[in-house]
Amino acid sequence: MLLRNRNFYVFADLGAVILSFFLTALARYASFTGSRLAFGNLSGCGLLVSAYVLVILFYQPKRKIGERGRWNELQNVMLINLFMAMAVSMALYLGDPSMAFPRSFYALFFLFDCLIMYLERLYIRSGLRAYYDNRENRKKVLVCANGSNVRKVIRKLKQSGLYDREIVGVAVFGPTTGPQDPVEIGMYEIHQGEKGPEPAHSAQTLEEYAKKNAVDEALLSLPDYDKNRLEELIHYFETMGINVHVTINTFGLTEKEKLVENFGVYHVLTYAPRVFDPTELIAKRAMDILGAIVGLILTGLLSIVVVPLIYLESPGPVIFKQTRIGLNGRRFRIYKFRSMYMDAEERKKELMAKNEMNGLMFKMKDDPRITKIGKFIRKTSIDEFPQFLNVLKGEMSLVGTRPPTEDEFLQYEERHKRRLSLKPGITGLWQVSGRSDIQDFEDVVKLDCEYIDNWSLGLDIKILIQTVLVVLGKRGAE
């Protein structure tokens, strides 16, 4: 993966990790030879280097380093160090604690590493930019597009921040009425003027231009072009050693397709409103496991107080179990501290007329089924803590969408099911967006789909932080 993505900067990152370790040692101990430090020199540095290698194997930014902005790069560096901290914590928890440095050492290390790694990446980025500022070092690209979409293609290429390529020519293909009809092709050369790139009509034909000028690559975006002619055009460029890129919309597909991949023995186009990177989902799962372990420890401590209070007010099982619907319709048993009386499900039918929620959810202020201790644990969200077991089992995530009941799910329309295309979560976007104020199920669906469409690890971390603030402020949990 490292070679495929050409992330040569990982070697510089490793240097940053090692430098940060020794700077931390110098700042913390004012020496490199203290007995405690000397014992942990190799093991401590090796642990941090191994943590970085593990993280970078699973977490890869989608855009190249030269295409990322400064703020985006800072986010990447902070995420990498966060995942490194998780990996180190897990290794120390499972390993020999006598080999661990004090927590202040690791805190200082990650501060140094964030700073040094960020500056190192900015330096590499500026070096790449400087190298490709020389036009001779850029790949020369010839764009072939239909008259109906040529402006859109050029605009998108400009917006994509290409720094290592330069559009040198544009061939505009006219409409055709049949596979044998002649096609009018307008050829334009791109010159660098005082105000930037400027197109100028060329007297050369497409074939003459491609043969007589410097062209490294050709980008074809021709949804209106005959497929046999398209194949001939690709072959023509290949015979001259020109690499050819063909946009997926060339095949007359909708704009929802995102990915070309292997499916068994087939090479397929994958359609989806959102295609998730498997490495990012693995990182999300790793974060879930670590969070679930911490959450279950807190659940155990809370149980010492909460369990007796629940049982004394309403004898019966203190853990409420209910069938919920998870990822793409999978059924699982959700766990909560019981906050209602034992006959709550039977009494729900009697209270449906007082439902304050429009649509396929039930919500009622001052619900008579809720016990006194239940009101408290709901207000503080303590009732949700047993769900960390669902997270550890892989049925839920720390952050996701609200898992519906089976009754709700069976009433779903097709468009509602898209909110289940990610694992349900203990918390989510709609929970931190003022859930007490939301009165319409369609608003919940809208927020859930917004979360799915914009999902990232950074967004999960942001929602987790907002959840803590909401719980501490005792807002939104009715």
Image: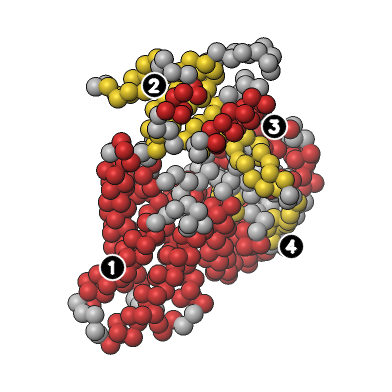
Marks 2 and 3, Cα distance to the nearest angstrom? 46 Å
Residue 466 appears in the figure:
no
On the image, the x and y values in percent for residue 390 come to 65, 59
Marks 1 and 4, Cα distance to the nearest angstrom? 58 Å
Reading the chain from its start, which is encountered first: label 2 or label 3?
2
Label 1: state its secondary structure: helix
Q: Amino acid at mark 4?
A: Gly
Residues at marks 1 and 3 touching, judged by CB atoms closer than 8 Å: no
Marks 1 and 3, Cα distance to the nearest angstrom? 52 Å
Residue bearing the label numbered 1: 19
- Which residue sits at x=67%, y=26%? 228
On the image, the x and y values in percent for residue 269 come to 66, 38
Residue bearing the label numbered 2: 189
- Nearer the observer, 145 or 63: 145
On the image, the x and y values in percent for residue 387 come to 63, 58
- Nearer the observer, 208 or 433: 208
Marks 3 and 4, Cα distance to the nearest angstrom? 39 Å
Reading the chain from its start, which is encountered first: label 2 or label 1?
1
Q: Which mark is residue 316?
A: 4
68 left or right of 58? left
On the image, the x and y values in percent for residue 431 come to 55, 43
Q: Amino acid at mark 3?
A: Arg
